[in-house]
Image: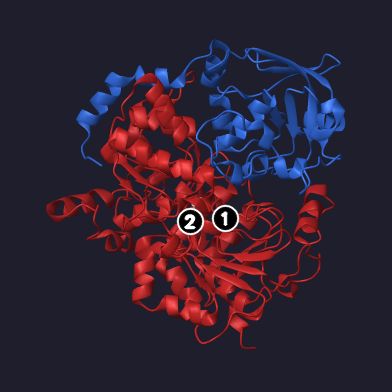
Chain colours: A blue, B red
Amino acid sequence: MQVLKRIRSRTAVLPTRDIDTDQIIAARFLTTTTREGLGKYLFYDLRFNEDGSKKPDFPLNRDESDGCEILVAGNNLGCGSSREHAPWALLDYGFRAVISTEIADIFRNNALKNGLLTVVVDDETHRWLVQNPGAELDIDVAASTLTLPGGKSVRFPLDGFARHCLIEGVDQLGYLQSHGDAIDRYEENRTWTP
Amino acid sequence: MRTLFEKLWSDHVVVPETPDTPAVLYVDLHIIHEVTTPQAFALLRERNIAVRRPELTLATMDHSTPTTPATTFRDLAVVGDGAARQIRQMERNCRDFGIELYGFGSDHRGIVHVIGPELGATQPGKTIVCGDSHSSTHGAFGALAFGIGTTEVGHVLATQCLLQRRPKTLAIEIDGRIPPGVAAKDIILAVIGEIGVDGGTGHVVEFRGAAIRALDMEQRMTVCNMSIEAGARAGMIAPDDTTFDYLHGRPCAPGGQDWDAAVTRWRKLPTDDGAEFDRTVTLDASRMEPMVTFGTNPGMTIGISEPVPRGDGDPSFRKALDYMQVVAGKPMTENDVDVVFIGSCTNGRLSDLEQAAAVIRGRKVASGVRMLVVPGSEAVKRAAEARGLDRVFIEAGAEWREAGCSMCIGMNGDIALPGQLSVSTSNRNFEGRQGVGARTVLASPATAAASAVRGKVADPRTLDA
Ligand code: SF4
């Protein structure tokens, strides 16, 4: 996994709550056998009209959203389907962090395993972020802090292991394999077999 | 004193968790399908890693497979190039890595969460995962079952283990007698409506109480299936005689003396008296009625006789009503129906099809309504046909299809058209889930069938009124 230590970027804001992974990437784009190139399908039905033209009022279609690496979304981001194509599409599009007041379990797991940082903030910070799209933020992964343009810094919860993997670029499969002996022992000592 | 979840968790810890590292948790059954595995197998190939326990891996194809009748069944072109590639890749991956695949031509093929229980591979006390969020279905047997992403699919293939933080526990007590006409689907929709689509985030739910104990296994699966729609990591129900009777004699269930030993072990699994949950929510089943969704997530749920709520001025709520083209203050029964879908891992089992057939028998699907009935597996299809259910549906004017996920996810070409209203027994009414611009109303099989007959969202209890 790529090392992720710090993100300095403006934000794009999608204030809708309960944005599910079907909206992030629709099922018809899941007939792929690779993880690359999914950015073009990100939020497809929200971004494009039926004729393929862009919907001008969708926040990501505005000029000022170009190059934003941080997405601020409404409460309960990433609920629904376990498709890992959702974080793959966000990363391929150019996002490196998502911020909300709550992030669904499976989506958070998938995101962190791919180097997409998930940031949960309090209501007040969230309200400010929603009201100030394009704000320049500075996120320090090791310190788990998010610094607002005025210099105010907020800490966010981040699982210690996930943080370690992000800043060191640890490969979790390699880590699991390093427990091979323990897995062998567990299998040998079971009182019943599945 | 421990809960069902705690017993399963501690029985599967290979390496305990610490503040700095998650637990290494052993997986007893890994179910895989064509859509969420290709990238995981690719990584194994890249690193030259074998599948650790192919015999603990159950493989099938369901998500993007065609459901059109058997004559065109092998004509992969019907599902598009991408899906055809995925299906071929799945066959190759299973062959190369020594995994038995219940693919085309297998009597056992079907939706991942339908075939696990049907084969008896889903058992109490097991940890079960699948790259699909409705893996919570298997929790109905007293298993700890949850959905994982593709990276984790790779972890399980390679090591039979996952890195996991221990979740919190939530008891959902459903007391009282379930009134006639109210189904398991109505109960779980009522639960999600009560606690919200994020009400279970970070928690494993144990469904308890008299109403849950009274459910048969297929109904229990419907309840656990939708735990994820409340954001829960998993849903579980303690195993009991209903569970054991269901499993006895199934192909993958223990046989002979092993059966008795297994039952003895399984009887120790239920939550001990006095064990504590992190949270408890209580609902009364006796006050429930058939439920329908009115918005764009499974928490936006009302009783069939209730008016669509007005909301609290929240823009997301207004956006949902606009998308659904429903009117606040009016009941859902005023809405015309275009499509009815009976199927999915939520309600695609034999008893679900029977409930729909009981409503539709001797009646006709209203003109202008398209009704699709898609069995959850080949075995469900055979059993339904043996009982003549296919004739009941076909004579009423419905389409009888091959097994698969079909319109639950709309990956195989089975979709509703933009703007169409679909009354569906599946589990997600997200925007575009059943096709771009399609409007989905989630309901029980009986409510969906009644809606097909009436041509409007309908209460199955008063179809003749
Ligand atoms: S029926 Fe729907 S929810 Fe169930 S496994 Fe298939 S796509 Fe997923």
Question: Where in the figure is residue B389, as x and y percent of width and height?
Answer: 42, 77
Quarter containing the C terminus of chain B: bottom right
Quarter containing the N terminus of chain B: top left
- Which numbered dot is residue A122? none
**Which residue has dot 1 on it?**
B413
Question: Where in the figure is residue B336, as x and y percent of width and height?
Answer: 72, 73
Tell me the chain of label 2: B
Residue B464 picture quarter: bottom right
Tell me the chain of label 1: B
* Residue B43 vs residue B353, the one in the foreground: B43
The amino acid sitting under disc 1 is Gly
**How far apart, in angstroms, are the residues tagged by discs 1 and 2?**
8 Å
Q: Secondary structure at mark 2?
A: loop
Q: Mark 2 and mark 1 in contact (Cβ < 8 Å)?
A: yes
Please name the residue shown 70% across and 64% down the image: B420
Question: Where in the figure is residue B97, as x and y percent of width and height?
Answer: 31, 33
In the image, is residue B188 above or below residue A43?
Answer: below
**Which residue has dot 2 on it?**
B66
The amino acid sitting under disc 2 is Pro
